Amino acid sequence: MTSMARIKTYLDCVSPYSYYAFTFLNKHREALKSHDVSVEFVPIFLRGVNVATGNQPPGTLPAKAAYLAIDIENAKRYFGLSALKKPSVFPVLTVKPQRGLIYIKNNFPEETYIEAFRLLWVSLWEQNKDISQEAQLAETWSGLFKEEELKRIIEATGKEEYKDALMENTNEAVQNGAFGVPWSVVRNAKGEETRFFGSDRFHFMWEFLGIGDGVGFVPSPKSVL
Ligand SMILES: N[C@@H](CCC(=O)N[C@@H](CS)C(=O)NCC(=O)O)C(=O)O
């Protein structure tokens, strides 16, 4: 029987904090699986969340922007993403990459989808590529797909079907309480559900899932529980 416990995390590659959460959850996916907790990553459009909720990007408040610069350095070190640096084009428009991910999620194995998601952050946040441009997006994914497949993925980024799909995912996140990313909707083995904002709430998440003591940031190995 498959467990009902799951972490569903809404992400946008425009967001460095989404990169942290993705990296961390991905790293612990196997450990989570051993606790019968599945992980799903859902591409959304952060700007759409901001419009729907009336939120503003955190950097628009000067005091917050100054703090973010410090926080991002700490998080880079903690999550082992030392190559991360702010792209020269920022914020880049991520609708096409995020729509492309939905196509990939629907048409390729999970591992390919997860790697395609990771490569978007590598391109944008480590290699300073403008992934809003089709050529740079195609280059980002060129090692993962055959030429024909890549062509279909890039075509999908301009199709109504995938425009709607990204909007639906974004609306779903907003209906689930999102005001920013990373946003996680988590269900435990008892079927209870709650939400977490950020890449810095995993200790609460493990506590809710019953897989840690609520203090440790890493899920406890099953053997010690
Ligand atoms: N404390 C959170 C901050 C996450 C964060 O600032 N996310 C940005 C996008 S990169 C956001 O959507 N912020 C909305 C808000 O702060 O209201 C963490 O460490 O992950």
Image (cartoon, rainbow, N blue to C red):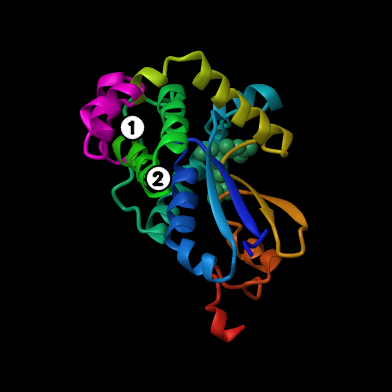
Mark 1 to mark 2 CA distance (whole Å): 30 Å
Q: Looking at the picture, how far across and down is residue 130, in whole percent?
A: 31, 25
**Which quarter shows the C terminus?**
bottom right
Residue 10 shown left or right of residue 185 in the figure: left
Q: Amino acid at mark 1?
A: Pro
**For residue 12, above or below residue 22:** above
Residue 212 shown left or right of residue 67 in the figure: right
For label 1, the SS is: loop
Counting the numbered discs, the total is 2
Q: Sequence order check: which comes first, mark 1 or mark 2?
A: 1
Which residue was labeled with disc 2?
109
Q: Quadrant of ligand 1?
A: top right
Q: Amino acid at mark 2?
A: Pro
For label 2, the SS is: loop
Residue at coordinates 71% horizontally, 64% vertically from top-left? 189
Residue at coordinates 67% horizontally, 65% vertically from top-left? 209
The stretch of residues the image draws in magenta is: 126-152
Which class describes the residues within 10 Å of circle 1: few (<14), some (14-19), or many (20+)? Answer: some
Which residue was labeled with disc 1?
87
Residue 204 shows in this picture: yes
